[in-house]
Image (tube, rainbow, N blue to C red):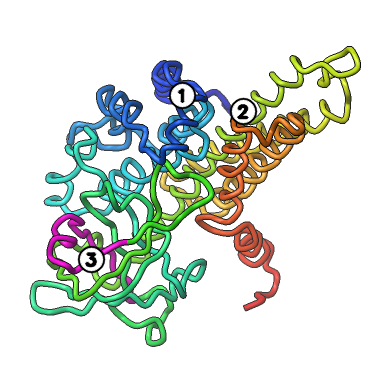
Amino acid sequence: MDFTLPDSALAVQRGIADICARYDLDYWQRCETDKRWPEEVWAELAKGGWLGLAVPEEYGGGGQGLLELAVATETLSASGSAGGSAFTYVLTPGFGAMTLARHGSRRQREQLLPRLATGEIETCFALTEPDAGSNALGISTFARRDGDEFVVKGQKIWITGVQRATWMLLVTRTVPAAEAKPRTHGMTVLLVNVPEAVAAGQLSFQPIPKMGANTTPSNMVFIDDLRVPAANVVGEVDQGAAVLWDILNPERILLAASALGGAEVALKVAVQYAKEREVFGRPIGANQAIAFPLAQVKAKIELARLMLYKAAWLFDNQRPCGTEANIAKLTASQAAWEAADHAFQTHGGMAYSLEYPVARLLADARIGKVAPVTEELLLNYLATQVLGLPRSF
């Protein structure tokens, strides 16, 4: 059993770290304060080919897998971006490139993958609805067939990155949830050209004010008689659940990687302050009340990393990874929250000052316990699907 990262992942780690070394915590704080996408970092990632990691080589990409994307996300997050890194690597390289590489038609792959690899175009993913969050199979956005097109009506919520996206992966119902047998039947994933849909008045969006992760807006999305060519179906009509699982498992793995990096940077900030801050003539880090919680965080980070890499490896090797993806997301998010919370406590009253990055790290860490799936739902999955306990709903 070899726990060494492959050379491909190590090369990604070094390459991303080299870029990140030029952007400190203050840079990421400015992006958050100004609610500004990290254009400089994005441009460097695109120029270096790091956005095309998961694009097959025949389409101009690196031909790498989810493990390399996870390492890239973790490294970017640990550099100081924390929660902001999730959107950088999930929205386009994850949602867009990986999904189309695995499920897109030849035409879709040829037209979109080379441009996704260079960062020329970007993608977003629209699943969650006001009345269907964790219950993904209960969505009501409906796509009705009309000749060579689908006509779509519905609403989505918490859709991140619509402002920048050229294409949206839109999850719809083509068979109402109440009529679907089994429940996974009748889902269809559509590729929507966002600028064209907005210009036609068929799609609109409204940003949601947020407590953190403001480098990328999240939105309410309104869909009104949106016309989508049938050629833009990703996968097969009514069989979109297979595509959906292939989106959700990588999403959880990449968000776990982002949380893990966030835990690392919070721990680093806490340790540095604990070494430098002196009270009663000695560094506060000499006190076990400060040192032991940080040591516990370190242990939890390392444990979460093992499950993260295992989950990504399983996905890349075409093996079931749902359990591992959920455990990775659960444990990494918990580690991130504990790291940020203890960093806050270590800084004492100074944590409340925006002179330090702790408040941003705390806000970014907190969202990981509820999005894109709540901690309770992850535990419910493990209880019912893994342990075989009775369902509560």
Residue visible at 28% across and 44% down?
97
Residue 249's place in the image compared with 74, above or below, is: below
Q: CA distance from mark 3 to mark 1?
A: 43 Å
Is residue 385 among what the camera can see? yes
The type of residue carrying mark 1 is: Pro
The magenta span reads 186-205
Q: Which one is earlier in the sequence, the residue at label 3 or at label 2?
A: 3
**Mark 1, secondary structure of its residue:** loop
Residue visible at 36% across and 44% down?
94
The type of residue carrying mark 2 is: Tyr
The magenta stretch spans residue 204: yes
Q: Nearer the viewer, mark 3 or mark 2?
A: 2
Q: Nearer the viewer, mark 1 or mark 2?
A: 2
Q: Quadrant of residue 67?
A: top left
Q: CA distance from mark 1 to mark 2?
A: 36 Å
**Mark 2, secondary structure of its residue:** loop
Residue 194's place in the image compared with 389, above or below, is: above
Q: How many marks?
A: 3
Tell me whether circle 1 and circle 2 mark residues in contact (CB < 8 Å). Answer: no
Q: Residues within 10 Å of mark 1 (few under 14, many from 20)?
A: few
Circle on res. 356: 2
Residue 216 vs residue 250, the one in the foreground: 216
Q: Which one is earlier in the sequence, the residue at label 1 or at label 2?
A: 1
Q: Position of residue 378 (x, y in %)?
A: 61, 58
Q: Position of residue 370 (x, y in %)?
A: 58, 56
Circle on res. 203: 3
Circle on res. 352: none
Q: Quadrant of residue 355?
A: top right
Which quadrant, please, contains the C terminus? bottom right
